Image (cartoon, rainbow, N blue to C red):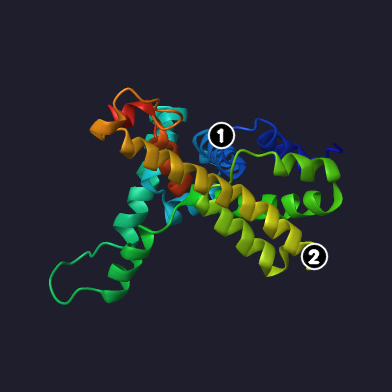
């Protein structure tokens, strides 16, 4: 398969054939972004201005704490907290509340620097997927060999494709292939979950569990685009 600076990351996430390739793509972008922001970038004035304004969601705060030092995270938090204190909190608590500042605080908790970086990266990678699917027969084969595409990324990918992301003459084939990857796995999951439930019926005593033992975990991954890690189950 022909590779360039745009297609190499795409090929990296499509080659493993393990789960949803778009989940792997997002995880790669999240890792790169959290390593970036807790590294030398945290000392760049323009980056710090942006992180002070946007902040981070809970999930990405947790990732930052895992990949960065406690000092690097503390320095990021120090200036972000100062920004909140100066711009959004009242200096005088007497009188009427400031509606604009309250609204700004609500907006703050829907804002995340890493989420924005990941969304930007995913949008660009979707375009590379569309281009590769349309022009590279080997990539199309690789695309169709995927284990599944989760519900979240199925919806995102098809929305991007329908929004002039892929040539209209190719859209029906792309839709068929993508819907098969999502819908086929959904059907398999439903069967596995149903079999799992049936195994608790006394009439199923001694029968084979088949592939149903981890059906709950696989269903959560398919529906939420996030795998349940072992610590979360204990």
Q: Nearer the viewer, residue 110 or 215?
A: 215
Using the image, tell me which numbered label, if any, was put on residue 130.
none
Please tell me which residue is depicted at 56% across the width and 52% down the height of the picture: 183
* Direction top: furthest residue: 206
Identified at 36% across, 45% down, the residue is 58
Element assignment for label 1: helix
C-alpha gap between disc 1 and disc 2 = 41 Å
Residue at 39 percent across and 46 percent down: it is: 79
User: Circle 1 sits on which residue?
Assistant: 40
> In the picture shown, does residue 39 fall above or below 50?
above
Can residue 228 be seen from the camera position used here?
Answer: yes
- Which quadrant: the N terminus? top right
How many labels were placed on the picture?
2
**Which mark sits nearer the N-terminus, 1 or 2?**
1
> Is 118 positioned to the left or the right of 130 in the image?
left
Label 1: how many residues lie within 10 Å, few (<14), some (14-19) or many (20+)? few
Residue 225 at what x, y percent from top left? Answer: 48, 45
Please provide percent x and percent y for residue 22: 60, 44
Residue denoted by label 2: 167
Q: Furthest-left residue in view?
A: 94
Does the image show residue 226? no
Question: Residue 231, position in %: x, y?
Answer: 33, 27
Residue 83 appears in which quarter of the rendering? bottom left
Q: Residues within 10 Å of mark 2 (few under 14, many from 20)?
A: some
Task: Point out the residue furthest to the front here.
Answer: 203
Front residue of 54/160: it is: 160
Tell me: 186 left or right of 56. right
SS of the residue at dot 2?
loop
- Percent from the top left, x then y, of residue 229? 39, 30
Query: For this view, does 49 lie left or right of residue 202?
Result: right
Which residue shows up at 63% across the image and 51% down it? 180
Which quarter of the rendering shows the C terminus? top left
């Amino acid at each position: 398969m022909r590779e360039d600076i745009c297609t190499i990351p795409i090929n990296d996430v499509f080659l493993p054939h393990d789960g949803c390739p778009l989940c792997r793509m997002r995880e790669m972008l999240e890792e790169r972004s959290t390593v970036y922001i807790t590294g030398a970038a945290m000392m760049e004035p323009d980056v710090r201005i942006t992180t002070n304004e946007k902040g981070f969601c809970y999930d990405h705060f947790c990732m930052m704490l895992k990949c960065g030092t406690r000092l690097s995270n503390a320095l990021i938090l120090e200036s972000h907290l100062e920004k909140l204190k100066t711009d959004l909190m009242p200096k005088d608590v007497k009188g009427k509340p400031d509606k604009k500042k309250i609204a700004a605080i609500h907006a703050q908790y829907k804002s995340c620097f890493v989420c924005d970086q990941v969304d930007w990266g995913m949008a660009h990678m979707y375009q590379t997927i569309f281009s590769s699917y349309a022009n590279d027969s080997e990539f199309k084969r690789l695309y169709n060999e995927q284990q599944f595409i989760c519900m979240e990324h199925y919806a995102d990918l098809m929305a991007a494709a329908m929004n002039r992301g892929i040539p209209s003459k190719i859209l029906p084939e792309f839709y068929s292939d993508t819907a098969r990857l999502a819908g086929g796995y959904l059907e398999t999951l439903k069967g596995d979950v149903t079999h799992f439930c049936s195994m608790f019926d006394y009439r199923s005593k001694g029968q084979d569990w088949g592939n149903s033992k981890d059906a709950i975990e696989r269903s959560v991954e398919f529906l939420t685009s996030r795998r349940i890690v072992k610590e979360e189950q204990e």
